[in-house]
Each structure stands twice: as structure tokens, then as C-alpha cells.
Amino acid sequence: TDEIKEHPFVMDADPRYPKTEVYHSDLFGNDIDRLTHSSGFDSEMIFVPLKKQVLFTSTRGGIPGVYWLDLRTNAVLPFQFNKERPQRSPSLASDGKTLFWIEEDLIDKTQNIVTASVLGKNRAVVRNLKGIIHNVVFSPKNQLIYSWIPEGAEFSQVDLYDETKPCTQTLLKHKLHFSEMQFSVKNPNLMLFRVADSDSSQVYRWELPVDLGPCNEGSPSDTLKK
């Protein structure tokens, strides 16, 4: 994806969603082909092998929604769009069949992590949080991990959630901003993520510890092991 500045002195209506488009190239950055053409934000894309299509966030409908992009025809079709509840930041689970994304409830001022099959069936809310969720990723060990800022907090954190228990464990917490988590293909415990402040950002790598400590749902006196 790339940010397009057709009018460099015109401010974006929402700085969270600058004018961007989706491109395709080979592994060396050659043979660049522009895949989307819209008046707003096209980004946060993932490739879904089961459908052989790209799923991405777009504001082409006026507010953020999640759309399919057919790589054979360049046709764009909506997957999740709701005028009252913006949908964004899709992620694919390790099974290749389950999708996760973020839904904003503008009335309750909460944000949800939502799941459904690649076909859009069995839709369900996994997490309902008061705060701002930045992005969601699934680890190779089938663990749901998300970065967010709790309501009223002065810090950003990365949490791991196990729905089977249920159990939430905080992996990282800092005043800097965590986002764009990804896992190494060769090492399933190695996580890469972006850390940013007001004027700069860097990419870090961090190996998850074996012992993540107790669940946040436990006693208030529990403390996380570093």
C-alpha cells in the first residue's frame, strides 16, 4: 500500500485514514501494478488463500469497511460494511478459514473484535473493549493477540486472549504506541511490531516468554511476570 498525495496541501478528512491505494509487485519491487482506485483509504490488506483474494480496509463507502479484492478481475466487493459501525483491520487465523477484524460501536463508544468464517458465516463478537483497538493478529499457535489503549489510559498495551479458558494476559505495556504485530514464519514465538511516539517509529522484535504469568481475570493483587 502507498499513500497518495494528489493534492499535497489538502488535509485528509480523518488523519487515521489518509488517501492510500493497494499495489502489487514482484518480490524485488518491480512490475508495480495499482490494484485499487478510490477516493479514500485502501489499506490493511491480507491475502486469503482459501478464496485467492485480498481482504482490506477501505473508506470508499464513506466510513471504514472491509472489502474483498479479486486479483483476477480487480473487482471489489463488500465483506463487512455498516454505516453505524465502522469495520476495519482484518486478520486471518492460523487455520486459514477464520477471519477477525475490529468493529467500532459509535453509540456505546466501545470497540469489538469480531470473528466469522471466510464466507462470512458464524459471525460473533470475541472481545468487547472500552478503548481503542489498533490491530489484531493470530499467532502460529492459534493465539489471539491485539494492541490497544484502554479508555482513559496513558499507555498502549499488547494482550493475548485465550477464548477456551477464558484468559487474558498482557504481554507488553508502555507509553509508546504498539501496532502492526506480525510473527516470524521460522520461529512461532518471535513477534515483530512497530513502536511509535509523536514523531518517529521503529520496528522491534521480541520473543514471547514461556511463562506469560497469571490471567488478568484473576485477583486484583496478581502481578504479571516480566
Image (tube, rainbow, N blue to C red):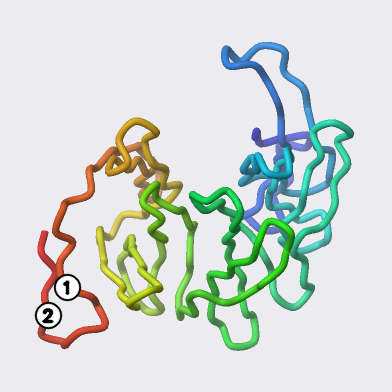
User: Label 1 crowding class (10 Å Cα cut-off): few <14, some 14-19, many 20+?
Assistant: some
**Secondary element at image label 1:** loop
Say which residue label 2 marks.
222
User: Left or right: 147 with respect to 23?
Assistant: left
Taking depth in this image into account, of 43 and 218 the one nearest to the observer is 218
On the image, the x and y values in percent for residue 175 come to 28, 60
Name the residue rendered at 24%, 42% in the picture. 206
- The vertical placement of 130 against 9, above or below, is below
Say which residue label 1 marks.
214
On the image, the x and y values in percent for residue 31 come to 72, 13
- The vertical placement of 168 against 181, above or below, is below
Residue 71: which quarter of the image?
A: top right
Q: Quadrant of the C terminus?
A: bottom left
- The vertical placement of 77 against 173, above or below, is above
Name the residue rendered at 36%, 68% in the picture. 161
On the image, the x and y values in percent for residue 208 come to 22, 49
Q: Are marks 2 and 1 in contact (CB under 8 Å)?
A: yes
User: Left or right: 97 with respect to 136?
Assistant: right
Residue 86: give its label: none
Residue 191: which quarter of the image?
A: top left
Name the residue rendered at 42%, 51% in the picture. 179
Among numbered discs 2 and 1, the one appearing first in the sequence: 1
Q: How many marks?
A: 2
User: Label 2 crowding class (10 Å Cα cut-off): few <14, some 14-19, many 20+?
Assistant: few
On the image, the x and y values in percent for residue 54 come to 71, 42
**Residue type, mark 1 in image:** Pro
User: Left or right: 98 with respect to 135?
Assistant: right
**Residue type, mark 2 in image:** Asp
Taking depth in this image into account, of 122 and 206 the one nearest to the observer is 122
Q: Quadrant of the N terminus?
A: top right
Taking depth in this image into account, of 82 and 14 the one nearest to the observer is 82
Viewer-side label of 2, 1: 1
